[in-house]
Image: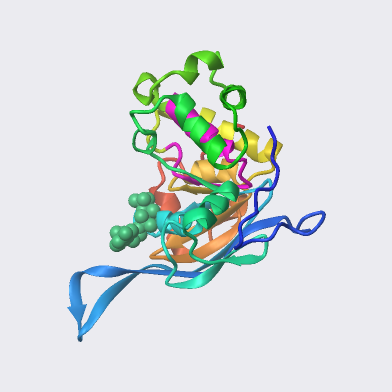
Amino acid sequence: MNTVSTANSSTTTPPAAGGDPDGVVLEARSLVKEFRAAGGRRFGHAATFRAVDDVSFELRRGRTTALVGQSGSGKSTVGRLMAQLHPLTSGEILLDGQPVHAVRGKAFTRYCGSVQMMLQDPFASLNPLHRVEHVLGRVLRIHGHARTPEEVREQSLALLERVNLRPSTRYLTRFPHELSGGERQRVSVARALAAQPRVLLADEPVSMLDVTIRREILDLIDTLRREERIAVLYITHDLGSARAYSEETLVMYHGKVVERGPSEQVISDPQHEYTQRLLAASPDPARRLAR
Ligand SMILES: Nc1ncnc2c1ncn2[C@@H]1O[C@H](COP(=O)(O)OP(=O)(O)OP(=O)(O)O)[C@@H](O)[C@H]1O
């Protein structure tokens, strides 16, 4: 599959020849996100709740960074900020070193050409009225990777092969309800790949799947990371898979990153009291998934 840079947005510039020596594709700098708090106004001002508080990190080519934390710690909000689905309260997101301002319209489409998001619920993220060929064809056309029906079909089949949905011709004409949960999530991966992105934001991509299927999907994402040099943000509450599938782990608590470092180190020797509690609450904190 072609992994050409698609950073042709007016908000971005392509990397310098040879690329960033550190391989940084997408960077979060001091991200803050406040939501209006439930319960209205205080002291005459709208009360706000800070879901993300001064979060910074870098996503590098061919590497996976895990964002872990308990429910409500702010992980998904970080993912949505990086995907440009929420405006920032403050802070900055940089793609190829260039600030990305809250993008809409065509600029948003161009941003999605570089940064794709994958959600945990494949039932909700795939339109039940559309066949797989429509789902993939739409993305291929929007990003200009296929134009004619023949090109769309050929590339869609190649994408299905890439995510191990074989025979691909059979999957092309299926509706989401004709697929298993794991197959649906493979279609979600294929849809993300159709944009030829350089960054994949995977928000709990396996939490709704049967345990037996989880590893298959995580292995697939890991293969793409390695072979296509995609930068992956892996959002999860599962410390075992963060350890197995990411080089770096960030631990979030109440909107802040309280600990970060090489995954092996963070999970085998946590320094922060919250990470220690998270590990203690994990069903098998010492678990290490075989690769
Ligand atoms: N659109 C919104 N409006 C108001 N509050 C929100 C909004 N989105 C998220 N929040 C709040 O922000 C906090 C962080 O939510 P977020 O979904 O980022 O957590 P999370 O760590 O991803 O949790 P989970 O693992 O359960 O998905 C929560 O308290 C949530 O209620």
**Is residue 200 covered in magenta?**
yes
Residue at image location 65% in from the left, 44% down from the top: 230
Q: Is residue 150 left or right of residue 45?
A: right
Residue at image location 43% in from the left, 56% down from the top: 85
Q: Measured from the top left, where is residue 88 in percent x and y?
A: 44, 68
The residue most toward the right is 18
Residue 228 visible? The answer is yes
Query: In this picture, which residue range is highlighted in magenta?
Result: 183-206
Q: Measured from the top left, where is residue 284 in percent x and y?
A: 45, 40
Residue 69 visible? The answer is no
- Quadrant (top left, top right, bottom left, bottom right) of the N terminus: top right
Judged from the image, the quadrant occupied by ligand 1 is: bottom left
**Is residue 19 covered in magenta?**
no
Q: Is residue 171 left or right of residue 254?
A: right
- Quadrant (top left, top right, bottom left, bottom right) of the C terminus: top right
Nearest the viewer among 140 and 128 is 140
Q: How is the image coloured?
A: rainbow
Q: Measured from the top left, where is residue 175 in percent x and y?
A: 38, 22
Q: Measured from the top left, where is residue 216 in percent x and y?
A: 53, 28
Q: Is residue 167 above or below residue 132?
A: above
Q: Is residue 179 above or below residue 97?
A: above
